[in-house]
Amino acid sequence: MFFRLLRLVLILALVVVSAAPSFDAMAQAIGQGSAALIAEQQKAIQDLTAKTDDLEKKTSQEASDDAGLVDIRLQLEEMSRAALTSALAFRSRLSDINNRVEALGAPPAEGQPPEPEIVSSERGALASEKAEINAVIAGAQNLSIRINGLIEKIGTTRSELFRNVLTKRYELSDALSPQVFSDAQDEYANLYKAVSSWLGFALKFKFQAMLAATLMALALAAVLFVGGRRLFGRVFEADPSVEDPSYLSRLSVAFWSTLLPTLAVGAFLASTVFFFNYYNVLRGDIGVFLNALAAVIAVVFCVNRMTNAALEPRLPNWRLIPVETGPARWLVRLTTAMAVVIGFNNFLSVVNDKMGSPLSLTIARSFVATIIVGVILILMALLRPFKAPDGSWRPWPAWLRYTAIALGLFTIAAALFGYIGLAIFVSLQVVVTGTVLVTAYIGFLSAREIGEEGGFAGTSIGRWLSANSSYEDAALDQLGLVVSIAINVMIVLVFLPLILLMWGFQPGDIQAWAYKLATGITIGSVTISFLGILTGIVVFIIGYFLTRWFQGWLDGSVMARGKVDTGVRNSIRLAVGYAGVALAALVGISAAGIDLSNLALVAGALSLGIGFGLQNVVSNFVSGLILLAERPFKVGDWIVAGDISGTVKKISVRATEIETFQRQSVILPNSNLINNAVGNWTHRNKLGRVDIRVGVAYGSDVKQVHDILLEIARGHPLVLKNPEPFVLFTNFGLAALEFEIRVFLADVLNGATVQNDIRFTVLDRFDREHIEIPSQPRAVVEPKKHEAWPIDDDKIEVEFAAQERAKAEAAAEAQRLAKAGRKARKPDPG
């Protein structure tokens, strides 16, 4: 034994000695890896610092370009995220260093023996490495702070630019001088020269590419228009044959007849520009002009479609606003003219910027456009669109009329006082933002009507689904609610960016907000990520449907083919379902970015409330799990629980459903079935015994009775031969000799039928054999007999004679008193 112990000690010593170099080599490898990571992140931070310097210079150079500032801000935000990523790259290494330092312990104090050299050298190396890492992290954090400062500076600069555009005042003397007309002629000549030169070059050298791009754009337009009309013709086209369309139909036609054609035209214009750029047909300045012209066409088309859809000059029955036909046509013309003026002004502003036109020409153009828009607004306000019953014309409601007049006068006054930027901004918002808001409002109204009960069933799609599918009214209402939510979400996603763009925001702003909304919004110490939440919901839904599919496959394909008992199949299916849903919920919560460890405190706080307030619920839940695991009974079993007897229909984690033989469904909490005695007639199998009691009169031949009863029991087809039936002479009763027939059945659920058949057979055999079945003696109660009244006529005559006799006696007594000279005295009270 001693030698074995010595041998073990020597082996351990050799292992330690041989492992020391390997530990050193491992530490050296880790140090080299950390050095490489430090060098890599230092280089990344240096590159980010150089880019930040360049962008800072660019910010000063482009201080007057709003779009350029937005682009710079997007780059800075990306660099800020990269700097934070560099700082987070050392998280795992710092954790390892701290754990190792903690394992080494605190250094020895003064006066204590020094620690081994290998420990002190390792401690110094870890401290040096940690210092280098902290220096890199500090550099990354300082860079991030600097970048955030530049982002805030860009935001301040953009706000000042926007205020300057609205509040800057121009002198109108130069803009209204005769020199403006000559500048306009020169501008037109230069534009014509640029377009004609490009067109000549394109037709001469790029004719095939230009033709291919045009044909592809036209083909796409044909597909959109023809296909859209075939698929959605009933949705966005008013039916002239309908005399009284519903409000929902008018709303839907107005909304979709504005949105779908506008999207089709926008897709056509965008594809035209795309294909021209793809085939290198466009020149730089011509590309800018074409983009601006496409935007103007799209806006004018949208405004015209919206006003036509809401006012319907040709179909009064489909009008959303109950105006007369003449004013409806004038409203459509004035609104379209206002959109044309604003769109043409914006197109000319692009041309002026690209061609370097004089400032006086730009001011004159904007001045004329704003004056025209203001006059049109006043004309629309003064229009009388309604007709009274007496035939007189009525104006708009006062609040709408005065608002339009105020906007028109404000636009004209701003232009006359030289605030051209403010006048243009107000005009643009009135036309474009007004159109977008009205269209969105009509869409919201349509979605609300579709979501109402019976609303979706009244639409053309709802009627088609009702006629060609098995959807009931309740299912159509639920589908209508889903469609309503989808329409609301679509309206927000489509129209909100348009409104933001109209109010001076750049596409980069919307992109940055969308990124922040998707990646997370920090409120205090809580970060809410809508993308993470959406991802978690999608993951949970996928996990839920996968669980349901696996349940069906396991039950229908595996267990059904294996002839597994129905109760076992139900228990396994429920267990798999609960486990799958719980797993899907956990995975969904993790995918949503919620740290499950943070839920420990919540679970601990809820445990006290669960222990008191939800004690019964938890008890039933745990009891349900025990029932599913132990399976004291299963679906289809005949059980007896107290006064309740019936068949188990469903076992859930909270309660068990039992159907009595009277077809009453009884919901029993699972804790009652666990804590109390429960009888199961069909626990392992359906074999069971049925007892039938029979009594015969005293004096009967008991052996004959025994033989007859045994013969009857053996003769029933449902009674088992093994175990065989038997008959017991159980008791000498008060009025009868008592026997008991005991039979065994393969299915105890047939017990009532067997008892019924045997009792009928016993009565027949006893009647043939003259065997009496006594009954309990009963007391005879004779009813008391009353004298019968005479017939009705005789009774009436007797009563009448008695009344007459009483009157005669009273009259005789009165005469007697009168002869005696006394008055009749009233009886004493009481």
Image (spheres, rainbow, N blue to C red):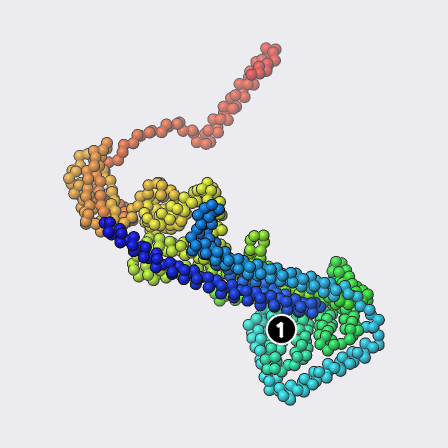
Amino acid bearing label 1 = Gly
Is the residue 627 above or below the residue 156 in the image?
above
Res 197 quadrant in image: bottom right
Residue drawn at x 43%, y 60% is 27
- In front here: 637 or 716? 637
Q: Which residue is mark 1?
A: 266
Q: Nearer the viewer, residue 158 or 738?
A: 158
Q: Residue at x 33, y 41 (%)?
A: 677
Whole-percent x, y for residue 304 in the image: 68, 71
Residue at 59% over, 84% down: 212
Side of 684 where 66 appears, left or right: right
- Residue 125: image location, x then y, percent: 48, 58
From the viewer's perspective, is 643 left or right of 490?
left
Where disc 1 sits, the SS reads helix
Instruction: Answer with the quarter of the image where residue 790 lies.
Output: top left
Q: Where is residue 350 drawn, in percent x and y?
A: 71, 74
Quadrant (top left, top right, bottom left, bottom right) of the C terminus:
top right
